[in-house]
Image: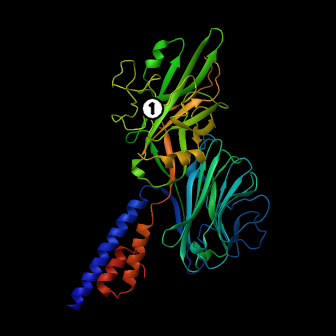
Amino acid sequence: MRNETQQRQCAQRLGLAAIVCALLMVSTSSAAVLYDTTFPESTGILPTSWVLISGSNADPGWHVDSGNYVYNGTSPAFPASVLDFATVFTDGSTAGNLVEAIYSAQFSKTGPLTGLVAHHNAAGDVYYHARINGNNLEIYRFNGGTGLLASAAIAPADQYVTGQTWTIAMTTLGGKDAVQVGALLYDENGKLVAQARTTDNNALRLTSGTAGVRGGDTSSWETFNISTPKSVTTAVGNGADTYVEFRTDAASSAITNFGNATTALVKAGVDISPAREIYRKSYLRFDTSAFGHAPVFSASLDLQTNGNNSTGVSFTVYGLNNGATGDAAPGSGGWIEGNGGTDNSPAGEITWNNAPANSTANNVDLASATLLGTFTGGVNDEQLRFTSEALVNFLNADTNNLVTFIIVQTTAGGFGATNFLQFDTKEQSGGVAPKLSLVLIPEPTSLALFVTMLLALVRRRREPVAVCAAVRSKYPSVMRY
């Protein structure tokens, strides 16, 4: 009877472990991990891809010195052997191939601790450092303008206790005109205890670089990895992309639908002789239902230019307000991308005359839309990335998992001039559909607490050796003793 009871208890633990593993797989499946390593904390030996440099001035930059990851000199330079992800993030075509990454590490503090550092190859070489400084979580920048960019206090009740395993993460979304950098700190139960974020306008066009951890003792780090943010394109679910047009020399343009176009256009053109005007505005809708309602920590809107040169031209991004006319799924009051032409089939397909929040010329009705910011155009076949604090706030205000962006040209140029924006839509064969990149803050800590309770349950009981050895073999990452 006792053996049967023990076997039943262990089988129950096996079932719980299987549930935990399934939940963990679901929670991490949408993030692409590009690099990961487990630090040999029991011995303090450095990973084989790192180098041990003798002397504090052996390398004028971030480097390993007597087991510590330290900084020296005025012109930082990572040893190439630390961790170089340039080949992962860029294809070498233009400087517009920008970095988007999430760096994270687990640590068990035994000595001085700072955090994560990333070096990006931009003008002047920029180093971002997400660090724990006393009881504050900070984002710091070296070069490209030096100083503290953002800071968040860790509440007394949430401060680190020696021996616990915590997680720190740093995010970078490199924009054409601004870079969004963030830092997140989680305690051993997965509770978010501090977060800081900044939009930095002094370090533009991030392209590639290196990253690593920095601490007083390498044995205090358990894991380190680089992954990419979650993303969704206009080709997913109820997503859509098109543009609307008005021109004074063609009255039919205001009732024309361009839903089947392979590129979306943004233009504001005015000529005096002959007197004529043309305006085009792009509408993009993203279906974010796959992400639930997890809070957005940082975000970017990504466009792939096609067939024009708009360098130096400014474009403005608006978000259709939550609940405004047109903010719904097609068939439920949302705008309809359409199939092109002037036949209004399907009924209600978007045109200049019925586009939500549309106004005259290159204006938008601010009673129905929110200004999110501006970005500058680029050369043909370049990735443009727009990011701002207003974009993050707009996404967090959404309640129906459908968000619409309206893009207009800020200042009018000539009618026939080539200073307009043209980018791929989802209909472009072999193209790159508009994309929304998101760094999400995980939902409340029920999963982490569940894992903690499971481990506590297991630790309180002695297991039958034969059965639970099989459990440990099948679920080594969950059944840790």
Estimate the x, y position of residue 338 in percent, counting from the top left: 38, 27
Q: How many marks?
A: 1
The answer to whether residue 197 of the structure is visible from this angle is: yes
Q: Which residue is mark 1?
A: 428
* Viewer-closest of 240 and 60: 240
Estimate the x, y position of residue 222 in percent, counting from the top left: 55, 73
| Residue positioned 53% across, 16% down in the render | 247
| Residue positioned 41% across, 67% down in the render | 446
| Residue farthest along the top direction in this orientation | 274
Estimate the x, y position of residue 197 in percent, counting from the top left: 61, 55
* Viewer-closest of 114 and 38: 114
Q: Residues within 10 Å of mark 1 (few under 14, many from 20)?
A: some
Q: Is residue 254 above or below residue 31?
A: above
* Viewer-closest of 190 and 232: 190
The answer to whether residue 207 of the structure is visible from this angle is: no
| Residue farthest along the bottom direction in this orientation | 2
Secondary structure found at label 1:
loop
| Residue farthest along the left direction in this orientation | 1
Estimate the x, y position of residue 438 in percent, counting from the top left: 51, 50
Q: Amino acid at mark 1?
A: Gln
Q: The C terminus lies in which quarter of the figure?
A: bottom left
Left-right relation of 276 to 66: left
| Residue positioned 65% across, 67% down in the render | 136
Left-right relation of 426 to 318: left
